[in-house]
Amino acid sequence: MGKSRKQQQQRRGAGTRVDEYTDDDTLSTTTTSSSLDALSDISITPEIEEEHDDATKLESFIEALYQKRASIRDAGLKGLIEALTGGVLVEFTENNYETLLQRFINSVKIGASSEVAQAARALGLLAITVGAGDIAKQINAEASPHLEKVAKVGSSPAARASCLDAMAILAFVGATELEATESTMAVFWLIISHRANHFEDQKTGANTPSGTVKAAAISAWSLLLSTLDPKRVSSSQHVQMCLPVLSRLLKGDDLAVRTASGEAIALLYEVTNFLSTAGAADDDDDGDSEDTGAVKESVRTSSEKPASSKSAMSVVGKALEAQEAHVMEQMKSLSVHAGGKGQPRKERAMQRSAFRELLATIEDGVAPEVSVKLPAGNVLSLHTWSDIIQLNVLRHFLGEGFQRHMQENTLLHEIFDFVPQVEKNTLSKKQKRMFLSPNSVMSKARTQVMNRRRSYSQAGNIGIYDVTEEQDE
């Protein structure tokens, strides 16, 4: 026992002497480089593991959509929705869009109201993620008939509203032909103009819509209206046909329906104001030209001779004037006295503010300026009702994922002509915990290096003091 202890002490002493004569700089460099090498391996591994974990989770969500139990399918839909809103998963959606499309449609067809609402939203998110193109066109063509059925005759207001939202998004992204867009708008208008009685149900083939459903239909219709060429709006007589119905809806008790109707009216006025301005500019440039384009053809009747573009504008103006006085009075009343029974004070104040802005558009032709703060100091500025309506619909549909998609989704960049600045710090939350936290691997490694340096320094100082004391003696 004594011999072994003595040998251990000798080994410790030998080790101590080696440390005393070791170059501190060399030791520190060696220790630091080895720590950095280990950290470089650690910094790569979690990213690979995180990507692997995410891919595994997405696969499990897809597998859940094949299950017979509704609760499992619903959980899979919620997981996919969270993934599609939390990031722009272009590669994942492009590789799996056919499977996702068929599974989502299946949930719309066989699911209960909650599952239908989730599946409808998932379809819209799928289209937003893949962006405009052939895939979005296919999604719109295959999914819209099933969404339309629920939107018209579904028993759940939430499911009907969700299907209307999804139809609008699918057509907005994937409808490349005017006929497809206007066909979807016709479905929305059928619900908007529904007068809530049994005879109307039989006539239109749609159940009586609740306020939530009607407000969703108006917003969806406005979104697609914002994509049409102003001349097409005039030639299709949207103003003459739609203004009386929207004016009637301003009298209702539902706040969301009134606000959506007011925004649709402001959009119609904005479009016609653009046409009038464009027509006046054409007259200034070309004079009394005989070739006045599509606008002249759209307003010509069998008993009229070909008119100038200015005359065509006056026809549109007269159609607006027939309802303008009444609509103006409604807008003024709603901007001062909020209608609706039992509405909270805050909501009434919001309505008055909204209708003051809408009234300014109708009276002065000026849309409000809207600015949205985004990450990395980005600001999205909008100046027309067309852009504002598109923003409101997309922000509502994406929910918490709007900021992320606005920053990374090229589709939204194209829609709003937006070029984001690059974020300075691109680390994920997991990476921030690993490298920036006081308890991170990097921080612990630095602490270990500093502790070793202190111990070497202290050992050297003790040796110097011992030598000094022996000399003094």
Image (spheres, rainbow, N blue to C red):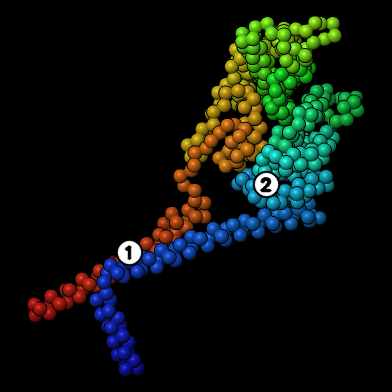
Residue 231 placed where, x, y %?
71, 18
Local crowd at mark 1 within 10 Å, few (<14), some, or many (≥20)?
A: some
Give the quarter of the image for residue 302: top right
Q: Quadrant of the C terminus?
A: bottom left
Residue 5 placed where, x, y %?
32, 89
Q: Earlier in the sequence, mark 2 or mark 1?
A: 2
Q: Is residue 158 left or right of residue 19?
A: right
Q: Is residue 471 left or right of residue 151?
A: left
| Residue type at tag 1 | Met
Tell me if residue 308 can be seen. Answer: yes
Vertical placement of 182 versus 446: above or below?
above
Label 2 – label 1 distance at C-alpha: 47 Å
Q: Residue at x 72, y 8 (%)?
A: 290
Q: Quadrant of the N terminus?
A: bottom left
Q: What residue sits right under mark 1 in the picture?
A: 450
Residue 176 placed where, x, y %?
73, 33
Q: What residue sits right under mark 2 in the picture?
A: 81
| Residue type at tag 2 | Ile
Instruction: Identify which residue, 456 or 135, lies in the foreground.
Output: 135
Local crowd at mark 2 within 10 Å, few (<14), some, or many (≥20)?
A: many
